[in-house]
């Protein structure tokens, strides 16, 4: 018989106590694994979200976290807006002139390059207009660039793909400016698809309905990013919605109106498709002074310009620029991390208590087994051998308990994997393990070794001659 | 005659609970020949068990030598004695011999687990058959009668192919009929396996059947006439 068999026999002989100790350890390990899995899922979800492609978010002065929550996560209370001419500062002189021509506004704006334009060269600038809801989901007014330029995934190289339909267009003959693309969760939970018309509500999930509807032209595939729970609408359509144009004084409105109509006639080759041009004129786009953006996603062509631009923007009085990855990591470090660490600590204490349980269980059995030990010694077993048997017994509890806990935890994870993926985009299965989990077995083995020390020492010291007499 | 066991000038002293030392054994000479079966009789408290423990290397004498085959076990380290015991000595106790967690067969196997000698797994089964318990191989000790338990213990003591079997009143707790069976079994098996035997007994009738009877009270010079009883 091997020592393992002997230890296993002892384990089985005291089955009730063994099973109870094993279960308590199993529950402890299960909790640790679960917390680690949650930790893994959350940090994974955070990294996925942090892999946004753009390196700066520019928004009105205020809390950097709130700007990030709004722009990256589409969460938190809506924030103030930035005037459109601030957004224009990120563009070159010809592009600005183009905007003035198309939308109407102070012609001087088109005569100089944007202050921040040189920083951006080679990168991209994507505006977001927030504030509306579709059901409980945020409506995001943006430009087609959002889908063309942004990437996601761990390497930030996956373009958005569609389970149905297509991306937003600047203008389409069919729906003019009133197109929408919905994230996968929005489509699922609101039960909408391509062809459906959505009516955003203003200001809050329960706000009043806008009369204008946006026709859904695309449903995105799940990305595991907050984009899954957003509805994207054409920024121009967003502005044309009731109450979205910033109120301005009358003469200014007139001036822009004229400028606008001039644009249409003088320059037929606007930013939009030539064939849609005719229909585009049916809608009068609102003028620059009436326009606002909530935040601006910026990717510097040369990443080295990022910090410089951030400083330049933050020195101004109107706006702030934040690095979303930094904010996300800060959020992770400041709130989620400590919480999970606390949880982990508690569960580790559970394991420790379970290990004490092993100690008590084995130690209590020492009185019964002193004679067994003496008999084994009389059969030629060495002190070290009987000691080893005790340690193996403790290891058995540890390994079986750890396996039990692992299976329990991963069973639970597998059971909820679908929901986890829906909510976070992180795919988890029965066998997906975090690296930390690999540390559990050595940890538990160490704990059980420590737990076995006292009884093992007592086994080592067992006097053969006197215990054979009992 | 070739000796399997040769004891010379053996002295064993225990420290007393009240202080002072008590010399339990002082044996100038005791020898057992190869294959010989010797009965050891003596008063209760006379030191019989202590003597067996010394021979098995479970206790260390204060003086003297114990030679088994060619090995002077008093010179061995504790580990050396453990190893020697596993390979050369079989031990049958008065009672409570078996490990309760193990089946009869496993108990017999335990007898050859700790030695470095042969681990022929069929030997355990053979021995069980020899003691007439082949059909009880998978019973736990608690499911066996005391006599059956003692037979398993004999099989186990022989499992490691010892040179000498030490038996400490193996029949004391068994009813007379079983005692008779156990005694015959242990003697026959030792004879077949060519194992020498030193058996402690109270029973003069049993002792009389042995090749030789040693009276501890005679060979032990310690405490003669003075030990409390
Ligand atoms: N560890 C010990 N410490 C002190 N005295 C001991 C110890 N072990 C045995 N003795 C003493 O040694 C003497 C011999 O004990 P032993 O058990 O060898 O007697 P025995 O001949 O086997 O008696 P019995 O026939 O009753 O089993 C006893 O007086 C006992 O009190
Ligand atoms: Mg005795």
Image (cartoon, coloured by chain):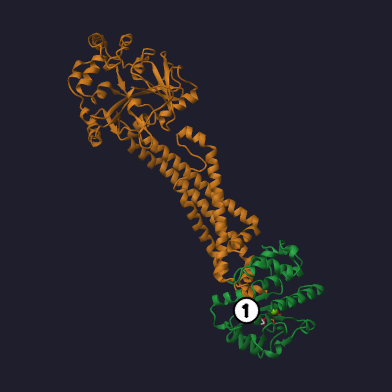
- Image position, residue A238 (x, y; %): 36, 18
- Quadrant for residue A86, please give it: top left
- The chain letter for the residue carrying disc 1 is B
The answer to whether residue A359 is visible is no
Q: In this view, does A164 lie to the left or right of A318?
A: right
**A70 horizontally vs A12: left or right:** left
Image height of B20 relative to A417, above or below:
below
Vertical comparison of A15 with A370: above or below: above
- Split into quadrants, the picture shows ligand 1 in the one at bottom right
Chain B is shown in which shade?
green
Q: Is residue A84 left or right of residue A183?
A: left
Percent position of residue A111, x then y: 17, 19
Identify the residue position indicated by label 1 in the image. Answer: B56
Coordinates of residue B226 in the picture (x, y in percent) = 69, 90
Quadrant in which the N terminus of chain B appears: bottom right
**Where is residue A303 drawn, in percent x and y?**
26, 36
Whether residue B217 is visible: yes
Question: Which chain is drawn using orange?
Answer: A
Label 1 secondary element:
helix
Is residue A331 positioned above or below A231 on the image?
A: below
Query: Closer to the camera, B223 or A164?
Result: A164
Answer few, some or many: residues within 10 Å of disc 1's Cα (few below 14, many 20 plus, some between 14 and 19). many
């Amino acid at each position: 018989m091997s020592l393992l068999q002997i230890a296993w026999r002892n384990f089985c002989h005291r089955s009730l106590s063994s099973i109870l100790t094993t279960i308590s350890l199993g529950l402890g390990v299960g909790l640790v694994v679960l917390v680690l899995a949650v930790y893994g899922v959350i940090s994974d979800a955070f990294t996925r979200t942090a892999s946004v492609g753009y390196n700066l978010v520019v928004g009105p002065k205020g809390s950097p976290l709130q700007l990030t929550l709004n722009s990256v996560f589409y969460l938190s209370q809506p924030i103030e807006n930035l005037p459109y001419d601030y957004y224009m500062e990120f563009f070159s002189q010809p592009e600005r002139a183009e905007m003035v021509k198309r939308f109407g506004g102070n012609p001087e704006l088109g005569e100089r390059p944007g202050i921040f334009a040189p920083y951006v060269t080679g990168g991209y600038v994507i505006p977001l207009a927030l504030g509306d809801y579709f059901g409980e989901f945020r409506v995001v007014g943006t430009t087609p660039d959002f889908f063309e330029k942004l990437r996601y995934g761990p390497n930030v190289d996956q373009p958005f793909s569609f389970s149905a339909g297509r991306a937003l267009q600047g203008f389409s003959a069919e729906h003019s400016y009133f197109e929408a693309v919905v994230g996968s969760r929005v489509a699922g939970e609101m039960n909408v698809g391509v062809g459906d018309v959505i009516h955003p509500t203003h200001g809050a999930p329960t706000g009043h309905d806008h009369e204008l509807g946006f026709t859904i032209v695309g449903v995105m595939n799940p990305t595991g990013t907050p984009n899954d729970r957003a509805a994207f609408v054409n920024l121009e359509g967003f502005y044309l919605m009731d109450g979205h144009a910033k109120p301005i004084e009358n003469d200014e409105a007139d001036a822009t109106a004229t400028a606008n109509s001039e644009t249409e006639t003088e320059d037929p080759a606007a930013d939009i498709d030539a064939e849609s041009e005719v229909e585009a004129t049916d809608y009068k786009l609102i003028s620059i002074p009436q326009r606002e953006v909530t935040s601006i996603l910026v990717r510097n062509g040369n990443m080295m310009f990022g910090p410089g631009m951030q400083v330049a923007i933050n020195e101004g009085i109107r706006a702030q620029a934040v690095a979303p990855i930094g904010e996300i990591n800060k959020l992770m470090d400041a709130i989620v991390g400590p919480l999970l660490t606390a949880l982990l600590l508690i569960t580790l204490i559970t394991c420790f208590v379970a290990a004490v349980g092993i100690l008590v269980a084995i130690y209590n059995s020492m009185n019964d087994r002193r004679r067994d030990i003496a008999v084994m010694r009389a059969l030629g077993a060495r002190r070290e051998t009987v000691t080893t048997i005790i340690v193996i017994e403790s290891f058995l509890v540890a390994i079986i308990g750890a396996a039990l806990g692992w299976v329990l935890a991963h069973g639970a994870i597998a059971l909820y994997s679908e929901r986890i993926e829906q909510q976070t985009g992180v795919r988890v299965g029965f066998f997906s393990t975090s690296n930390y989990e690999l540390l559990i077995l050595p940890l538990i083995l160490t704990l059980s070794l420590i737990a076995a020390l006292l009884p093992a020492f007592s086994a080592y010291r067992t006097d053969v001659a006197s215990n054979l007499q009992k | 005659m070739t000796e399997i066991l040769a004891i010379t000038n053996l002295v064993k002293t225990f420290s007393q609970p009240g202080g002072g030392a008590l010399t339990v054994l002082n044996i100038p000479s005791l020898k057992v020949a190869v294959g010989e079966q010797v009965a050891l009789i003596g008063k209760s408290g006379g030191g019989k068990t202590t003597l067996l423990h010394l021979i098995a290397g479970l206790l260390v004498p204060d003086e003297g030598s114990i030679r088994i085959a060619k090995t002077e076990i008093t010179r061995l380290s504790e580990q050396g004695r453990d190893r020697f015991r596993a390979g050369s000595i079989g031990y049958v106790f008065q009672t409570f011999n078996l490990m309760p967690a193990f089946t009869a067969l496993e108990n017999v196997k335990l007898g050859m687990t700790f030695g470095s000698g042969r681990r022929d797994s069929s030997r355990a089964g053979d021995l069980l058959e020899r003691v007439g318990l082949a059909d009880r191989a998978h019973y736990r000790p608690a499911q066996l009668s005391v006599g059956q338990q003692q037979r398993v213990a004999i099989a186990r003591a022989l499992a490691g192919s010892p040179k000498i079997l030490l038996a400490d009143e193996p029949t004391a707790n068994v009813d007379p009929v079983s005692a008779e069976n156990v005694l015959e079994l242990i003697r026959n098996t030792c004879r077949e396996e060519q194992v020498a035997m030193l058996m402690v007994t109270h029973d003069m009738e049993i002792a009389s059947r042995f090749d030789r009877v040693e009276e501890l009270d005679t060979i032990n010079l310690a405490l003669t006439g003075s030990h409390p009883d």
